[in-house]
Amino acid sequence: MTTPEFASNRENFCYRHPDRQSFVLCQRCTRTICPECMTQAPVGVICPECMAAERKNRTPAQKRAQRQWRRRSPAALSAVQAGKPVVTYGIIAVTAFVYLLQLVPGFDVASLLRFWIGYLLPELSGAPFQPWRLVTAMLVHGGILHLALNMLALWMIGRQLEPMLGRWRFLTLYVLSGVGGSALFGILSPGSATVGASGAVFGLFGALLVIGLHIGANMTGLFVLLGINLVIGFVPGFGIAWQAHIGGAIVGALIGLIVLRTRKRSQRTAQILLLIGVAAALLLVVFVVAPWVLG
Ligand SMILES: [Zn+2]
Ligand SMILES: [Zn+2]
């Protein structure tokens, strides 16, 4: 897989903007389109030409329904239809809100949400069984700098990656990468608890790296951002877990590869099954491999 080879492949460029790299295919004509050329349709994203063709083929009743729907849809729905990265903004809003809760004196939200492998293995640890902590740990942060760096990376990558992947695939990538980070941390560092979106954010890095290398994109900005995040991870006393970074990056790269290899509409079922497979493998790691390693 050499970058120049992919960079010279026309299939890695938008057919309407030959200078823009992308890996997303129109789900109707299967040509490559850039984020600007994508319109959300019930089948996935489609290109402007196919959009025009669909419009022309609509019956008068369908046109009327479409107009009424537009008029009634609230702002949030309009944002969704306009292809804004609403999942990215939503995760940032929820994470910032949880951080504000962390600042409330006497309400220890961090100890309610943080992850420790013992909460998954009550027979070994004697702790209560609280598996949701695999996910909720992503919402809690060790300090304002930790929060700011993660949300900055999420904002920068999410605006780029979410329109390409689509909302559900992006959310799946974020959550499963976070779980992957917690899982690896739990196995390698069973004595301690972890918080933060770092695993999930490193999953975004991993996915974007795989996709970017494939289409031959210029990734200098990505490497700078990645470098800052890596350096911060080794600052003593900062409490950021490199194990979670690696776990998240592995899961993210894997999901990036799956999405890249199953871009066509006909491969949709295969893609969903493969993503479910990743989720199942993570559950296998935390509920079967972890007790075997730690027990
Ligand atoms: Zn098309
Ligand atoms: Zn384009």
Image (cartoon, rainbow, N blue to C red):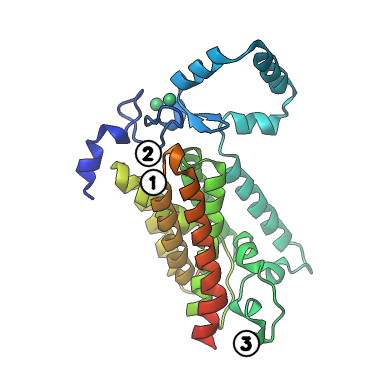
Q: Disc 2 on helix, strand or loop?
A: loop
* Above or below for 6 versus 129: above
Quarter of the picture containing the C terminus is bottom right
Amino acid tagged 3: Leu
**Which quadrant of the structure image shows residue 86?**
top right
Query: Where is ligand 1, by quadrant?
Result: top left
Residue 218 seen in this snapshot: no
The residue type indicated by label 1 comes to Leu
Left or right relative to 191: residue 219: left
Residue type indicated by callout 2: Phe
- Report which residue position mark 3 lands on: 124
Disc 2 residue crowd, few under 14, some 14–19, many 20+, Cα 10 Å: many
Q: Residue at x 45, y 28 (%)?
A: 28
Other residues around mark 1 within 10 Å, as few (<14) / some (14–19) / many (≥20) = some
Viewer-proximal residue among 109 and 43: 43
Q: Position of residue 239 (x, y in %)?
A: 53, 71
Image point (78%, 67%), residue name: 107
Q: Are marks 1 and 2 in contact (CB under 8 Å)?
A: yes
Q: Which labelled disc corresponds to residue 260?
A: 1
Closest to the observer, 87 or 9: 9
Q: Label 3, label 1: how many angstroms apart (C-alpha)?
A: 40 Å
